[in-house]
Image (tube, helix red, strand yellow):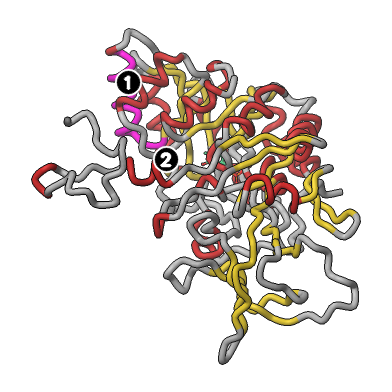
């Protein structure tokens, strides 16, 4: 059962009516459920319990510190893709020993920070990266613990922009070069190469691409071992999908069965990096209807959330269910609307020709499945203030990221003196002048 459900005619987050939250924090806002986060983690954890494995939550899906801390408290590790995320994982209580650093373009400074922090593993995606990491590690008098990310060249059968395991994608080392790269890595003084990693894409709703990819990993592992190399870690990435619109993503137990069948007998330590699956269903974006605008060819519902808050529909043509917070009568007439935001882009649209019950100016709506790749992708476009994030916990809630104020918006930029700053323009708010004075 979803933690976001109607009770007494109103959509709730756990025990809290959304209208009350909207009155307290203003709209738009992201609302996360601690119970949903915790139960997703516990379900994943129970499913992999029999395997020698670690769950490294992929922070990029939602890097709010309170979300990370929810998982950290339950024993999770983290998969990070930047120094910023690495610092967030540490700040939220993930032990360095459980952190894996992924990503195709790490800088020397990020490598240095990761090595000094003593994280579990750095996943290397190319020879130039391997050589730079070797150099950085030797400079510090350390050895970097490494897995090589391979590109298994399988089609994840997901949206092109979130497919990562095909030969034409930028990710990983191509199959034909893995053995030579592994050989080279094992000869470098600053590198301790321990295994292989892969991540074939996101929002996978089919197990067959996993099976194909994990089989390739198993074959390569056998080949590498056959020439005397040590492979004792496999990082299987993330990517398991959720239901946005009636998809039937695999059950975790079935995914784990594929893992056992393909790589289970290799006697390696395993890492899983779920992101979306852990957080996607645990969040919603709550917004208020500004205007219902009848148009010549279609009718619009203009809401106070926009593509800067949630870009998935504009970026991936993603579908998000939209629910009225006040429950519609079962016999309410349904009409088709385009649900749009206030931004000056036609792409600022959450839904096209979506059947909805009657809505009025001032009504609240919830955009569902907004826990993953939502707040983290927010921008400041149109100089809109970022939507706050709240975490509901039973009958209580906390603001886990506050809405910034206009003061901080204006304070971001500096007008150089030679442009005549200080002439009393409204932009010259106090605090806007920096250390240059
Ligand atoms: C994005 C990413 C993940 C998480 O993907 P989900 O689809 O959110 O599960 C895991 N590992 C790596 C390397 C990633 O880039």
Image: magenta residue range: 125-138
Residue 138 on image: x %, y %: 30, 13
The residue that appears at 78% across and 31% down in the rendered structure is: 42
Relative to 102, say whether 175 is above or below. below
Residue 378 on image: x %, y %: 49, 50
Task: Say whether residue 276 is left or right of residue 228.
Answer: right
**Element marked by disc 2:** strand
Residue 329 on image: x %, y %: 88, 72
For the C terminus, the image quarter is top left
Q: Quadrant of residue 186?
A: top left
Q: Is residue 336 magenta?
A: no
Whether label 1 lies within 8 Å of ligand 1 gets the answer no
Counting other residues with Cα less than 10 Å from the Cα at mark 2, is it few (<14), some (14-19), or many (20 or more)?
A: many
The residue that appears at 63% across and 36% down in the rendered structure is: 399
| Disc nearer the start of the sequence (2/1) | 1
Numbered tag placed on residue 134 in the rendering: 1
Q: Which residue is mark 2?
A: 173
* Residue lying farthest to the bottom in this orientation: 296
Quarter of the rendered image showing ligand 1:
top right
The residue that appears at 76% across and 76% down in the rendered structure is: 358
Residue 53 on image: x %, y %: 68, 25
């Amino acid at each position: 059962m979803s933690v976001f459900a109607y009770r007494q005619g109103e959509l709730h987050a756990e025990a809290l009516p959304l209208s009350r939250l909207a009155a307290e924090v203003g709209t738009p806002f992201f609302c996360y459920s601690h119970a949903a986060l915790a139960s997703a983690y516990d379900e994943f954890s129970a499913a992999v319990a029999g395997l020698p494995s670690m769950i490294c939550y992929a922070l990029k899906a939602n890097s709010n510190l309170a979300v990370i801390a929810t998982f950290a408290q339950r024993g999770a590790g983290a998969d990070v893709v930047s120094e910023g995320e690495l610092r967030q994982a540490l700040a939220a209580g993930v032990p360095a020993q459980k952190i894996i650093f992924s990503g195709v373009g790490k800088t020397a400074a990020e490598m240095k920070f990761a090595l000094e922090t003593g994280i579990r593993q750095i996943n290397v995606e190319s020879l130039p990266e391997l050589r730079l990491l070797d150099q950085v590690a030797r400079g510090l008098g350390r050895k970097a613990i490494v897995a090589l990310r391979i590109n298994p060249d399988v089609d994840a059968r997901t949206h092109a922009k979130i497919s990562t395991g095909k030969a034409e994608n930028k990710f990983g080392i191509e199959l034909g070069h893995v053995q030579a790269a592994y050989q080279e890595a094992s000869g470098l003084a600053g590198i301790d190469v321990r295994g292989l990693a892969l991540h074939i894409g996101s929002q996978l709703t089919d197990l067959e691409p996993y099976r194909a990819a994990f089989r390739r990993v198993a074959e390569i592992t056998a080949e590498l071992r056959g020439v005397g190399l040590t492979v004792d870690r496999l990082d299987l990435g993330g990517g398991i999908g959720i239901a946005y619109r009636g998809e039937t993503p695999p059950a975790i137990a079935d995914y784990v069965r594929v893992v056992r069948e393909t790589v289970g007998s290799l006697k390696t330590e395993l890492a899983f990096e779920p992101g979306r699956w852990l957080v996607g269903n645990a969040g919603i974006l709550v917004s208020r209807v500004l205007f219902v605008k009848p148009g010549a060819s279609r009718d619009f519902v203009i809401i106070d959330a926009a593509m800067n808050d949630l870009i998935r529909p504009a970026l991936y043509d993603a579908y998000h269910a939209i629910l009225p917070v006040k429950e519609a009568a079962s016999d309410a007439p349904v009409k088709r609307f385009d649900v749009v935001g206030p931004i000056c882009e036609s792409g600022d649209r959450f839904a096209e020709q979506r059947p909805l019950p009657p809505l009025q100016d001032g009504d609240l709506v919830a955009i569902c499945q907004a826990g993953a790749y939502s707040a983290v992708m927010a921008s400041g476009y149109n100089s809109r203030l970022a939507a706050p994030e709240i975490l509901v916990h039973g009958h209580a809630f906390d603001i886990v990221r506050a809405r910034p104020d206009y003061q901080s918006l204006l304070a971001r930029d500096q007008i150089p003196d030679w442009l005549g700053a200080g002439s009393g323009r409204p932009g010259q708010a106090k605090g806007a002048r920096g250390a240059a004075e």
